[in-house]
Image (cartoon, rainbow, N blue to C red):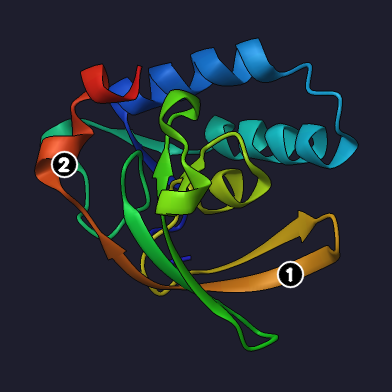
Amino acid sequence: MKYGSVIIEKKEYVFLKRILNISGYAADFEIQKSFKRLNEELKTAIIVDEEDMPEDVVRFNSRVLISSVSGWKREFQIVSPALKDVKANKISILTIMGAALFGYAQEDTVEWDFPSGKNLLKIEKVTQDKNEHNLEMVK
């Protein structure tokens, strides 16, 4: 892990904890397991102010290119649940993939449990749009 722990911007951390608490009762076992792991990672996360947030960390509205050891590559944007749009490649933080990548950095490799089993993902590229990190847009 590039920074030794997941890194989350302070306001996004508060927002994420709030939506995880509301969504913690998901009926799907795999999603519950993913939320539990994300909550565990939040306990040791490095919480920073906006101006100290590294550019290469996956956060709300980041565009992420990932690859799998099985050979596929995908690009999408991690968004709040209200902004998800699968056709536009916008996935919610409350999906297993969104939870798996949040707070990790470009070049990190993440091992996460998916319904198909454990998968090893490499974060190839993280792109930020400064205008999109306004929390008003992710409420």
Cα separation, mark 1 vs mark 2, equals 31 Å
Check the image and name the residue furthest to the bottom: 71
CA neighbours of label 2 inside 10 A, class few (<14), some (14 to 19), many (20+): few
Q: The residue under label 1 is which amino acid type? A: Asn
Q: Is residue 58 above or below residue 24?
A: below
Task: State the image coordinates of residue 127 (x, y, percent, origin top left).
Answer: 24, 60
Q: Give residue 119's mark.
A: 1
When the figure is inspected, residue 60 is found, relative to residue 73, above or below; the finding is above
Report the front residue among 84 and 139: 84
Residue 3 occupies quadrant = bottom left
Q: For numbered disc 2, what is the local secondary structure? A: helix
Q: Are marks 1 and 2 in contact (CB under 8 Å)?
A: no
- Residue assigned mark 2: 52
Relative depth, front residue between 6 and 133: 133
- Residue type at numbered disc 2: Asp
Q: What x and y, as percent, mark residue 96?
A: 67, 46
Q: Residue furthest front?
A: 87
> How many marks overall?
2
Q: Residue 12 at x, y = what percent?
A: 35, 27
Taking 27 as reference, is 109 left or right? left
Residue 137 falls in image quadrant? top left
- Mark drawn on residue 104: none
Residue 85 x %, y %: 46, 41
Query: Which quadrant of the view contains residue 95?
Result: top right
Where 70 falls versus 25 (above or below)? below
